[in-house]
Image (spheres, helix red, strand yellow):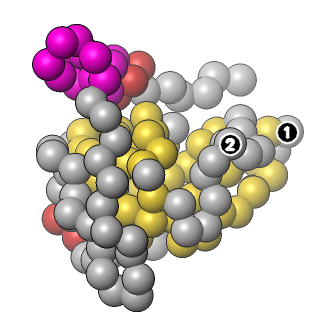
């Protein structure tokens, strides 16, 4: 079985961290606590989910809405629905049953190639970063 893996996105995240002053990863910035519809400003380079187009690389950020484990012919897929103020995207992690720290309510940044299906935007095995 071949599991697609987005190496380019992982190296881009690494280069972003190394590009910060002093070569150190950028410190996490604390924002105001989120409540209701108030959300913190998106990190630089992040685009709204509603503006995604197919077959393009993109970086999005949002809150995990739901996580679902889907068995698929001898393997597994972890489906994670991420929402921002403009829409929702499904991130599919093939061969995974869980990702530590990824749970409903957590904030995440995803980077990968977008696919648009009849059910909405999808990223397969995106690079991810848990946000504080």
- Identify the disc placed on residue 34: none
Residue at 85% over, 39% down: 74
Q: Nearer the viewer, mark 1 or mark 2?
A: 2
Tell me how far mark 1 sits from mark 2, CA to CA.
23 Å
The kind of secondary structure element at disc 1 is: loop
Which of the 4 image quadrants contains residue 17?
top left
Q: Position of residue 73 (x, y in %)?
A: 81, 44
Which of marks 2 and 1 precedes in the sequence? 1
The residue beneath circle 1 is 74
Residue, far top: 23
The residue beneath circle 2 is 100
Camera-side residue of 38 and 77: 38
Camera-side residue of 127 and 33: 33
User: Is 46 contained in the magenta span?
Assistant: no
Label 1: how many Cα within 10 Å (few below 14, some 14–19, many 20+): few
Q: Position of residue 13 (x, y in %)?
A: 32, 27
Q: Position of residue 98 (x, y in %)?
A: 73, 45
User: Is 14 contained in the magenta span?
Assistant: yes
Q: Which residues are magenta?
A: 11-25
């Amino acid at each position: 079985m071949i599991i697609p893996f987005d190496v380019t996105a992982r190296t881009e995240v690494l280069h972003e961290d190394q590009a910060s002053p002093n070569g150190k990863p950028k410190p996490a910035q604390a924002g105001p606590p989120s409540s209701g519809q108030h959300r913190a400003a998106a990190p630089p380079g992040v685009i709204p989910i509603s503006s995604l187009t197919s077959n393009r690389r993109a970086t999005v950020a949002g809150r995990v809405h739901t996580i679902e484990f889907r068995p698929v012919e001898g393997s597994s897929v972890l489906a994670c629905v991420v929402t921002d103020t403009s829409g929702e995207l499904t991130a599919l992690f093939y061969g995974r049953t869980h990702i530590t720290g990824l749970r409903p309510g957590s904030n995440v940044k995803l980077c990968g190639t977008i696919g648009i299906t009849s059910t909405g935007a999808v990223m397969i095995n995106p690079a991810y970063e848990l946000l504080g």
